[in-house]
Image (cartoon, helix red, strand yellow):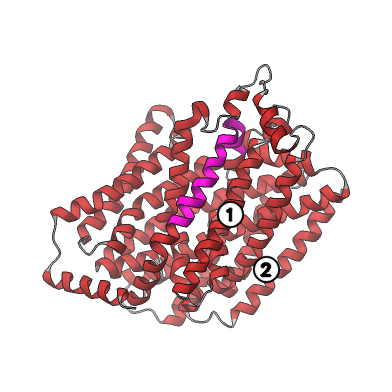
Amino acid sequence: MTNAQLYTIVALAVYALIMVLIGCISYGRSKTLDNFLIGGRKIGAWATAFAYGTTYFSAVVFVGYAGQHGWNIGLGAIWIGVGNAVLGCLLSWLLFANRTRKMTKFLNARTMPDFFEKRYNSKGMKILAAVIIFIFLVPYSAAVYKGLGSLFSSVFPGVETWVWMLLIAVLTGIYLVAGGYLATSYTDLVQGVVMIVGVVCLVAAVLGHKNVGGFSGLIQNLSGFQPLPGDPNPVTGSQLTSIFGGSSFKFLCFNIMLTSFGTWGLPQMIGKFYAIKDTAAIKRGTVISTIFCVVIGCGAYLIGSTSRLVLGGQLPEGGIDSVIPTLLMEVLGGGTLGIILLAVIMILLLSASMSTLQAVVLTSASAVAVDLIPAVRKKATKPETQMLLTRLLCLTFVTCSFVFATQNIPIIVSLMSFSWGVVSGCFIGPYVWGLFSRKITKIGAYAGILSGLLTVGSATLVISLNSGFSAAAAKSPEMGVAAMAISLIVVPLVSALTRNSPQETERINEIFESYKAE
């Protein structure tokens, strides 16, 4: 066993112990459904801000997005991190946090499908939303497994990838089932600190590499970069140093829009606003979360932009998904300090992945246990039965996503982008307009969900029939952005052509007046 492997195992053991202890401590405070799903709506600014940020960024961002876009685009890829921080985080908090907290509290809504049912007075919409969440978040979580599994395999080449994915599944399942959202909020706080420390250290280590030569050396060396003969994707220095992505400008814009505006409709992101305790916490959380996203997002893409220099322009044997793992081994593989830092970075990426995974699992399990099953059953489900069912479904979802991840499905980024685009494309219109406008009708909200689903579904079908699914997956950012835009347009348009009944209008007015008066 090498020193790198030994230090990583020790760090993993300490980290796992902390996560399990948090889950056990939180168990006694998570025996009601409100506490299990949304922490009793008493979560503070720091915990909520870190929960939002750590759910936003998983190992897929580092291994998939930062590796691929940093390698192909260069410094321009940093704009994705900037867009995530400003549009996906800051603007989301400013526009939606307070309205979401107040309206969901008044409606006593604990999940996104629950919000749709009570805002639009439609049990059918609740069922539809729950089904979409459960189906499409499985590949999303599978992408998280794949990203982290491939990274750990680079440090432990003799261990199969599925072993690491199983470790992630077991550890996530233990503390999530024990403590629910309360446990995840505390673990997110710990994970967020680890992520910040790890990214800062990694940026310093990468910039200090002999082939990079600091930030000024990075720009100078990238500008003079020439691709190796036979490079399947030759990129010159002018492309890598172009501030707006050069020939990849259009691709860059679509990825910024997908990964930034996409958070506005993702239930695992919006759900953080249900749990925050008050307006003062929201104001502090807005600042904290934005700073966190700037550090993590921009840091990840900055690291990715150095990859061609660090690796000498040679694409690793494992392809684009092996860029960041190979870079880490190159930068941190030698010397005691580098090995210790490598162990910290591995925990960073484990933290990022587990935080995202736990949010997705809790969202999906609650969609079935709290939204889907009670909606289709004629008999009322007891609260204690719902609690047990939610815990069991958390385990079930972890298992399903693990099994899905063990299948040989390539292209981590496209897999995650596809799921992200479908879910956000369905929900963004009904959610955003439902918060701001009293005139949005049930038919308009249905039209928004279905238009988002049909946009991605029909485009995927047509492209897959003509060019195969991999070609459709490569177009997932464009499809996701189109679905979100269409949903946002269709909801008010269809609502303008339809009318709520007088009774429904009165009910909606009461909702808006009550939550505004809080």
User: x, y (%) of residue 255?
Assistant: 47, 40
Which residue is at a point 64% across and 79% down the rendered structure image? 25
Give how far apart the Cα atoms at labels 1 and 2 are. Answer: 19 Å
Residue 30 — which label? none
Structural crowding at the residue carrying mark 1, measured as other residues with C-alpha within 10 Å and reported as few (<14), some (14–19) or many (≥20): many
Q: Is residue 370 left or right of residue 505?
A: right
Return the residue nearer the eye: 281 or 103: 281
Q: Which residues are magenta?
A: 67-91
Vertical arrangement, residue 180 with respect to residue 251, above or below? below
Does the magenta portion include 68? yes
> What secondary structure is found at the residue carrying circle 2?
helix
Amino acid type for the residue under numbered disc 2: Met
Which residue is at a point 67% across and 23% down the rendered structure image? 225
Residue corresponding to mark 1: 402
Residue 19 — which label? 2
Which residue is at a point 35% across and 33% down the rendered structure image? 462
> What secondary structure is found at the residue carrying circle 1?
helix
Does the magenta portion include 389? no
CB under 8 Å between callouts 1 and 2? no
